[in-house]
Image (spheres, grey):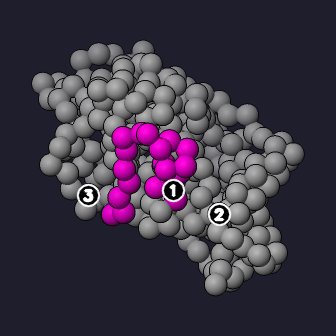
Amino acid sequence: MITKKFIDELGYTDFVGFINQWNVLPGAFTTISKWINYGKVNSDSRLLQVASTTGFQLRETATLTNCSGIGFDLSPYAVESARYNKETFSPNSRIEYVQCDGYQFQSDEKFSHILIGGGLKFFPDPQKMMDRCIEFLHDGGYILASPFFVTSEVPDEVLDRAKSVFGIRPTTESYKEIMGMYNKFEIIYEDKNSIEPETIEEIKYYCNCSTAAAVQRLNIQDKNVSDAIFNRLYNIKMMSNELRKYQGYSVLVLRFRKSIYPNRWVELF
């Protein structure tokens, strides 16, 4: 039986997975459209999504391009929801999701594109995960990323509250610090973006829609449980919204070529 206590005690990633929040990357559909255009994603592309959560990046890219691919995530709840979303919203797509630790993921095949969105920060050692991504990438393949960076210093009090909500300390690095992980690749496309905070009405509407979908899918009858889902999701969205005052994000299409990486012979303009 699903209880309020169960909802309240789930870790952040398991909560997102369990209620099937469409946990989108920075920029959502707009970022995916830029990736497809500048990263040359098409029906012949074979994609790997890192930390796939409930599957949005891979699923929607496949829906738009008919590419194929695989996503992995540590949370079994997230993988279950990703599979449900695939069958419900993109049943003809040639994609699959597996549950595993990213550091332990194995594949005998190489991929044309690796989708990392803003997810590297959720790994204890982001650079280690990036190095593993390179192992699975075709020579001449692309890393598709959308990392957050800070545009002004985030107060410690805000960081502490954010850590209690998300389970990790959010990004505190500047644009240049964040790009240190990416600028050894060839930067084929980059687009720096500011973020417009949502209104309370927009947040409530999103949370109502997401909660109603979770209640229906999980057949929840207890209002205490549905209220717990709404309240926790609302707190997550409000915390994210507060962080947006200090954040920007960059949409990146990065090319990996063995003959060049990790050298950089093109200036950073």
Q: Position of residue 56 (x, y in %)?
A: 52, 44
- Residue at horizontal 36 percent and vertical 50 percent from the top: 96
Q: Reading the chain from its start, which is encountered first: label 2 or label 1?
A: 1
Question: Left or right of 74: which side holds 158?
Answer: right
Question: Left or right of 99: which side holds 83?
Answer: right
In the depicted view, which residue is nearer to us: 244 or 202?
202
Residue pointed to by mark 2: 217
Residue pointed to by mark 1: 84
Q: Amino acid at mark 2?
A: Arg
Please identify, in this view, whether the residue under mark 1 or under mark 3 is nearer the observer: 1
Find out whether residue 93 is within the magenta segment. Answer: yes
- Residue at horizontal 48 percent and vertical 34 percent from the top: 63
Residue 81 visible: yes
Q: Are marks 2 and 3 in contact (CB under 8 Å)?
A: no
101 in relation to 89, above or below: below
Question: Left or right of 125: which side holds 84?
Answer: right
* Region in magenta: 81-100
The quadrant where residue 258 appears: top left
Question: Left or right of 122: which side holds 110?
Answer: left
Q: Amino acid at mark 1?
A: Tyr
Secondary structure under the numbered disc 1 in the rendered image:
helix
Cα distance, mark 2 to mark 3? 30 Å
Cα distance, mark 2 to mark 1? 10 Å
Q: Position of residue 246 (x, y in %)?
A: 67, 42
Q: Residue furthest right?
A: 201
Secondary structure under the numbered disc 3 in the rendered image:
loop
Please identify, in this view, whether the residue under mark 2 or under mark 3 is nearer the observer: 2
- Residue at horizontal 42 percent and vertical 15 percent from the top: 269
Q: Quadrant of the N terminus?
A: bottom right
Residue pointed to by mark 3: 105
